[in-house]
């Protein structure tokens, strides 16, 4: 098999503490790219390759497991030499659960392929912070909300302005104690389907989740406009 452009060779760091799971099975429908989001090009290489490169450079990360779109497993393997590739599910939770079957470390970091600008330092920070808090089940990257937040009716009539105090926008990477995440993924199917991030499942199971403030841009690529913004950030690096 030939290596893809932008391919990353993955090898474990000597001081690795965690396995990384990359959620890369999204269809990319809202992006309008005509194919899986993880393989959309950003700065000359597939979106997922940016996260692979950052994880390969992170000192805390050993093995990497990628939850891939069904039918594109070989293409992801060609992009990530040394990483384990599994078939993703219909929902995010199903994809993460499938990837966890290949994880044997006590800590696991879950990251979205759609957040290509996460740095090696950020991965190391969330892992280190989780290690420093033995009673914590999850440590998640987040940024305080800067915009005014309003609640509206179905007719788009504003019904309430919500105070920003104490409100955070949660991102990935998210570091977990693997056993805690496995238990949380045993939730009923309706709860799993409704989960927009893995930390939600830990909260619902009564676990302790803490936030790690993110200082650098770590946007999520969902729309074509997001991709253009990420291109600008990559060009400015």
Image (cartoon, rainbow, N blue to C red):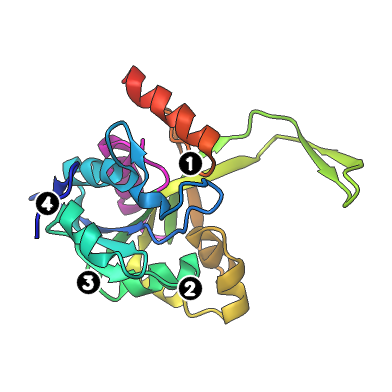
* SS class, disc 3: loop
Query: Gap in Å between the C-alphas at discs 4 and 2?
Result: 37 Å
Residue that numbered label 1 is attached to: 220
Between 155 and 75, the one nearer to me in the picture: 75
Q: Please name the residue shown 52% across and 37% down the image.
A: 224
Q: Earlier in the sequence, mark 4 or mark 2?
A: 4
In the picture, the quarter occupied by the N terminus is bottom left
Q: Quadrant of residue 103?
A: bottom left
Magenta segment boundaries in residue numbering: 114-136
Judging from the image, what secondary structure is the residue with disc 2 in? helix
| Number of numbered discs on residues | 4
Q: CA distance from mark 2 to mark 1?
A: 24 Å
Q: Tags 3 and 2 in contact by the CB under 8 Å rule?
A: no
**Of label 2 and label 1, which has the lower sequence position?**
2
Say whether disc 4 or disc 1 marks the residue closer to the N-terminus: 4
Q: Residue at x 39, y 67 (%)?
A: 96
Q: Residue 64: percent from the left, percent from the top?
A: 22, 58
Q: Residue at x 48, y 53 (%)?
A: 28
Which residue corresponds to mark 2? 184
Q: Which label's residue is closer to the chain start, 3 or 2?
A: 3
Rounded to the nearest whole Å, what is the CA distance between mark 4 and mark 1?
27 Å
Between disc 3 and disc 1, the foreground one is 1
Badge 2: how crowded within 10 Å, few (<14), some, or many (20+)?
many
- Secondary structure beneath dot 4 equals loop
**Disc 4: which residue:** 3
Q: Is residue 45 visible?
A: yes
Mark 3 and mark 2: Cα distance apart in space: 17 Å
Residue tagged 3: 104
Label 3, residues with CA under 10 Å away: few <14, some 14-19, many ≥20: few
Residue 180 seen in this snapshot: no
Check residue 185 for magenta coloring.
no
């Amino acid at each position: 098999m030939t290596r893809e452009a932008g391919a990353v060779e993955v090898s474990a760091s000597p001081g690795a503490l965690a396995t990384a799971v990359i959620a890369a099975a999204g269809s990319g429908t809202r992006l309008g790219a005509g194919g899986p989001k993880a393989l959309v090009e950003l700065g000359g290489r597939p979106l997922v390759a940016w996260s692979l490169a950052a994880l390969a450079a992170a000192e805390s990360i050993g093995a990497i497991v990628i939850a891939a779109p069904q039918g594109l497993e070989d293409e992801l393997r060609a992009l990530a030499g040394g990483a384990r590739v599994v078939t993703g599910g219909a929902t995010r939770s199903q994809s993460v659960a499938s990837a966890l079957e290949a994880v044997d470390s006590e800590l696991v970091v879950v990251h979205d392929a759609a957040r290509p600008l996460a740095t090696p330092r950020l991965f190391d920070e969330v892992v280190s912070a989780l290690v420093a808090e033995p009673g914590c089940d999850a440590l998640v990257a987040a940024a305080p909300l800067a915009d005014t937040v309003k609640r509206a009716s179905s007719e788009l009539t504003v019904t309430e302005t919500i105070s920003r105090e104490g409100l955070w926008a949660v991102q990935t990477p998210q570091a977990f104690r693997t056993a805690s995440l496995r238990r949380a993924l045993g939730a009923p199917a309706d709860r799993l389907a409704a989960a927009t991030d893995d930390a939600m499942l830990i909260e619902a199971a009564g676990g302790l989740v803490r936030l790690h403030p993110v200082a650098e841009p770590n946007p999520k690529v969902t729309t074509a406009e997001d991709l253009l913004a990420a291109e600008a950030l990559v060009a400015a690096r």
